[in-house]
Amino acid sequence: MKFTILVEMLFYLLAKRKVTAKYFAEKYSLSERTVYRYVDCLSMSVPIYVKRGREGGICISDSYKLPSGFMTKEEYAAAIEALELAYSQLPEERFLAAERKLSAQAKSEARDLALSGEVGTILVDGGTWGDTRAFSDKLHLFEECIKERNILEIEYRARTGEKTQRKIEPHVLVFKQGVWYVYAFCRIQRAFRLFRLGRVFSAVKTDELFPKRPFKREDIPLNFWTNETESVDARFEISEEAFADAQEWLGDENLKQIDGKWYADVTLPTGDALVLKILGLGAGVTVLSPVSLRAQVAAAAQKIANAYVK
């Protein structure tokens, strides 16, 4: 019974995008407290959150769609045909609305949504490794709101895991060091800031429009890691086997051949991400300096090796 209600709640949220706890409580003869427990269960795998206040409710992210492969092509066709037959016998709007939604979903299943940006000067594969569909849907939503100047209500997860709800005015998408950001005016902070798209748990497009605020390219903090406390001057030795990967990562202009060996001298952002990137290139890339970075990579490699020793 609980599973059936959870599935019905999910589909109703997909159709309405926002529903009150009182509505679900009355519909399923539950207490509002139980409804919120069900919402907690759904939120473990679906971007659902509770919006407080006079116009609040239980919301689902506008970027969320049913997982790819949820139904086969034949199952979509059968469901649509059944709804069309039902509408011909009983012409109620609910059958027509359901048929439209399923038809749109069936078409989107056949599309490759990994690519972002209109063909012209640049086309970027915005998908993330392992789940291109979900991230690309989110990316397209932000693109749409930038073009149409719709305010977005987002739930943002900090590095610590803490979630905050805020309204933002998205102005431009930024792709830096393999990571997508949106440069947006935050209504809470009353200032522009960069939001990392990967940390946006849910995003809901509102009907509220915003006037575009003036800003210059120089205002976007693209050099946010290059100060002395967050960057490191590193020197690498690169084998022939790892040359192509190092070339893509560091840029050909930073690679130099000396006495038949390849080296790179670069300034890079510090942190765990740098160590993991170096490890990802395997034994073909060796840190020569600084000694501290060399020690970090060696310690991380040893920790990984220990995890595989029984």
Image: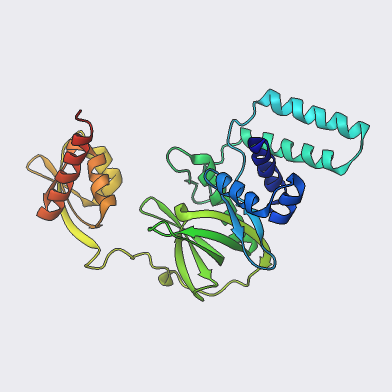
Left or right: 159, with 302 as reference point: right
Q: Nearer the viewer, residue 112 or 154?
A: 154
- x then y, percent, for residue 13: 68, 48
Say if 137 sits above or below 166 in the image.
above
Residue at image location 61% in from the left, 46% down from the top: 38
Is residue 211 positioned above or below 131 on the image?
A: below
Front-lying residue, 154 or 31: 31
x then y, percent, for residue 184: 51, 66
Q: Would residue 123 appear left or right of 53 to someone viewing this image? A: left
Q: Position of residue 233 (x, y in %)?
A: 17, 59
Viewer can see residue 118: no
User: Residue placed at 78% from the left, 37% from the top?
Assistant: 99
Quarter of the image with the C terminus is top left
Q: Is residue 110 visible?
A: yes
**Which quarter of the rendered picture does the N terminus lie within?**
top right
Residue at the spot x=67%, y=54% of the render? Answer: 32
